[in-house]
Every structure is written in C-alpha cells, then in structure tokens.
C-alpha cells in the first residue's frame, strides 16, 4: 500500500519528463565532439536510470495500471538503449560519427518524452 508521504506515480512520471527535457536541451546545445561532455552525459544518464529504477519501477506504486506498466517496459528499454548510444558516442573518433550518435541520442530522448506524455493522454 502506498504511503501518504510518497509521490504518486504520475508525479514521478512528470519528474522524469522534466529531467529528460533538461538533459535534452543540454545535449542539443553541444553538437561538436567533446569527450568530457560525453562523460558528463553518461553520469546524467546513470542518475536518470537510477531514478527510474528506484522510484518508478521498484517504488511503491499501488495505482500502476497495465497500460502504465507497458509504458514502463518501453521506457526501461529506451533508457538501456540510450546507455548503449552514449557508450558509442563516447568512443567516437570522428566528427561525422559524433554527429550521427548525437542525432541518435536526440531521437531516443524524443521517444522517451513521448512515452512520458502517453501517461497523460
């Protein structure tokens, strides 16, 4: 049973959405190859992944519906794939490869934002 002090599931989705939005804006501003920035993005990814796992997946969410559970599965999958994208971005040696990986990360963040928005439709 959910305690009165814990945030409800949709509040957690909103917080995840805000974290993703801030990160997406930061990534959009940095289109040039920069390994130090890519390392910072990895840390941000790890923090968002941890928030998702600890608060949303393993949290006390008595009100989660089958539709929300399905969205959780998709968000989890996209976050894992985003981690792979970041690993590949960090290993980029050319500006062209960086640009391609950077675009993939932006696309993946757009997909994650859409999954968050589906919770509210």
Image (cartoon, rainbow, N blue to C red):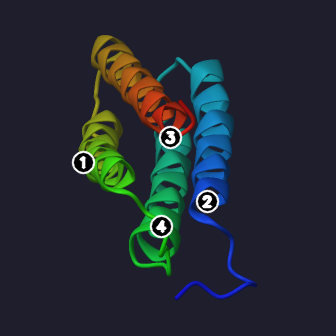
| Residue 2 point in image, percent of width and height | 58, 84
Residue at the spot of label 1: 77
| Residue 105 point in image, percent of width and height | 39, 28
Residue at the spot of label 4: 56
Residue at the spot of label 3: 119
> Closer to us: mark 2 or mark 3?
3
User: Distance between the Cα atoms at labels 2 and 1?
Assistant: 18 Å
Say if 7 sits above or below 13 in the image: below
Question: Residue at the location (39% across, 27% down)?
Answer: 111
Secondary structure of the residue carrying tag 1 is helix
Along the line of sight, the residue nearer the viewer: 73 or 81: 73
User: Distance between the Cα atoms at labels 1 and 3?
Assistant: 17 Å
> Closer to us: mark 1 or mark 3?
3
User: Distance between the Cα atoms at labels 2 and 4?
Assistant: 7 Å
* CA neighbours of label 1 inside 10 A, class few (<14), some (14 to 19), many (20+): few
Q: Are marks 2 and 4 in contact (CB under 8 Å)?
A: yes
* Label 1 or label 3, whichever comes before in sequence order: 1
Question: Residue at the location (52% across, 19% down)?
Answer: 32
Secondary structure of the residue carrying tag 2 is helix
Q: Are marks 4 and 1 in contact (CB under 8 Å)?
A: no
* CA neighbours of label 4 inside 10 A, class few (<14), some (14 to 19), many (20+): some
Secondary structure of the residue carrying tag 4 is helix
Q: Are marks 1 and 3 in contact (CB under 8 Å)?
A: no
* Label 4 or label 1, whichever comes before in sequence order: 4
Q: Quadrant of residue 109?
A: top left
User: Distance between the Cα atoms at labels 2 and 3?
Assistant: 11 Å
Residue at the spot of label 2: 12
């Amino acid at each position: 049973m959910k305690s009165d002090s814990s945030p409800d599931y949709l509040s957690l989705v909103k917080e995840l959405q805000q974290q993703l939005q801030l990160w997406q804006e930061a990534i959009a501003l940095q289109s040039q190859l920069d390994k130090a920035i890519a390392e910072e993005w990895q840390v941000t990814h790890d923090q968002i992944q941890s928030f998702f796992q600890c608060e949303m997946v393993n949290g006390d969410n008595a009100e989660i519906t089958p539709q929300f559970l399905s969205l959780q599965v998709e968000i989890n999958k996209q976050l894992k794939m985003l981690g792979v994208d970041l690993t590949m971005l960090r290993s980029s040696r050319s500006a062209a490869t960086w640009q391609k990986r950077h675009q993939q990360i932006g696309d993946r963040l757009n997909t994650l934002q859409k999954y968050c928005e589906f919770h509210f439709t």
